[in-house]
Amino acid sequence: MSEKNSVSKSVMWVLMGLLIFALGGFGITNLGGHATKLGSVDGKNLDINDYYRTVQQELTALQQQAGQRISFAQAQQFGLDQQVLGRMVAERALDGEAERLGLSMGDENLRDEILRISAFQGLDGQFDRDAYRFALESSGLNESQFEDSLREDAARTLLQGAVVGGIQVPDTYGEALVAYLSETRDFSMAIVEEAQLDGDLPEPTEADLQGYYDTNIDSFMQPATRDITYAWMSPAQLLDSVEVDEEALRAEYDARDAEFNQPERRLVERLVFGTADEAAAALADVTAGTTTFEALVEARGLNLADVDMGDVTEVSLSTNGALVFGAETGDVVGPAQTDLGPALFRVNAVLAAQSVSFEEAQPLLRDALALDRARRVIDAQINDIDDLLAGGATLEEVADETDMVLEAINYHAGSEEPIAGYSDFRALATTVTDSDFPQIESLDDGGIFALRLEGESEAAPIPFAEAQEAVAAAWRANALQEALKAKADELVAQMDAGANIVTLGLNVLQERDIARTGFVPDSPANLIEIVFDMAQDEVRSLPGDASYVIVELDAVHEADLASDENSSLIGLVSQQVSQSVAQDIFDAYTAHIRSNADIEIDQNALAAVNAQLQ
């Protein structure tokens, strides 16, 4: 990228940012006029408004990425404010270094850059000094400040080019990487399962099981637990006791009529043309089979998502409803006049009308209303239950006097009891101490609970008598895997001696042109890795799930580096790696410059602007 283009892009982004936030700023210019800078780097000021605007931009981008509102306080936990400040400090340190090296934009180049900025041009496309002055004044800048910022941007661009210019990773790097990734293998594989064993597995004796239990005691441990007594009440527990009259059910049904009774709909795409003649010609080509709707969309520089209307009703299409709803799936119809101009419609699917009667919807309606009323019943009891606990009542007494249910749990991370499914309960069960008094806590479904820690139990072996069934299953699985390995080793020895894999009486699968990123269903996770570690004609066995897999490497296919695809890939890899190396070098250079810079940060000003961002 040329110096001129780099500077031009930088200028436009800076100017856009200034203009967007021009009349906003903090809401109080320069923090009420008390501060204009956050500090300095080698005598160069860190502008307080630049910091504010950049943080706002980063925060907006973060919210768009997350798809939800993120407060500045939350962003601070991610370190956003420190990242912005760090970048500003680094840029000013580079500005100082560029100045020491005598790098600068000449007056003529500066003039050319300003003249090219469209925001400073009049209706005739020529530079307008009044527009220039007004834009800068609106942004809180004067001409000198703005032109200095242009010179500094240009100087930083020159400095970066001097540091990383000419860095190019040799093509051999890209060739080696593409050769590694693009080579493929042919292999044959056969799965040895219990059916292929020569006989049945022996039945274990009591001594066998006891020995296996003793040897693998870590596999038969009960976890450490927190022994908890709790009382709880959830909306689901009260469903049967909550009354919902038919009048309320019918009112809810009427309110949700659009959900239960939907008219016939179509999944439709709409492509708009400039004139009716263009639309008619396009429809004729589609009808004749000389083009497709997809090709028409692509020719307009669009994709199918751009023309997708989703599911629509006949009424929503207004005067075009009859036309579209008279078509079948796959039909392209038109031209039809729309608010956007002449258009063709394509029907992708027909969604039949849906009608759910009140009687059919009644169970669903009752559950919804009953749950809502159950939550209100629980809310009405919270204060009374709080008073009981505050007055010294035990959980047992509260359960006797209210609708709360008393239960106990030996809680651990893998607990499967219903109460353990609530994150609120898990959080408190993990932290409660034996000195904490029970108090009412909320559950995310509108329920409530209170708990008491009775004690804690250390992890310990499950007694053999209780674990015997699990021990027997584990012993058998282990015995099966050993027998399968012995069988697989025997078959591999036969193949090493010259036997063909297809003569072993096994179901043989042959895989061809499998790449390193390939996948073979129902195979060991490390199968491809093992295959690429093998030599041609080598045979190996590896454990699977209650099976053993025998693999023979049939052929090794080296990558064709001369192919058009791989040639392009080599160039792309070399370019990306070169850019990455250049960036790493420039980052290291920037860190070095920054470490030797004289940095002063006004913590009071920083705290003040951060307070404005809250």
Image: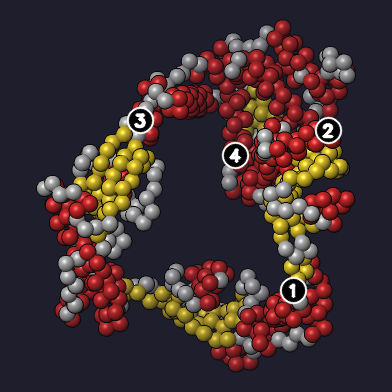
* Residue at x 29%, y 64% (from the top left corner): 546
Residue 52 at x, y percent in the picture: 71, 37
Q: Which circle's residue, 2 or 3, is located before the other in the chain? A: 2
Whether 391 is drawn above or below 432: the answer is below
Q: Which circle's residue, 1 or 2, is located before the other in the chain? A: 2
Scheme of colours in the image: secondary structure
Q: Secondary structure beneath disc 3?
A: loop
Q: Pointer 3: what residue?
A: 559
Cα–Cα span, label 1 and label 3: 60 Å
Q: Which circle's residue, 1 or 4, is located before the other in the chain? A: 4
Give the amino acid at mark 2: Asp
* Residue at x 60%, y 29% (from the top left corner): 89
Q: Secondary structure beneath disc 4?
A: helix
Residue 147 falls in image quadrant: top right
* Residue at x 67%, y 34% (from the top left corner): 290
Whether 605 is drawn above or below 309: the answer is above
Residue 96 falls in image quadrant: top right
Cα–Cα span, label 1 and label 2: 45 Å
Q: Which circle's residue, 3 or 4, is located before the other in the chain? A: 4
Residue 82, label in figure:
4
Residue 356, label in figure:
1
Q: Pointer 2: what residue?
A: 277
Residue 288 at x, y percent in the picture: 70, 37
Give the amino acid at mark 1: Val
- The residue carrying pointer 2 sits among few (fewer than 14), some (14 to 19) or many (20 or more) residues within 10 Å by Cα, namely few
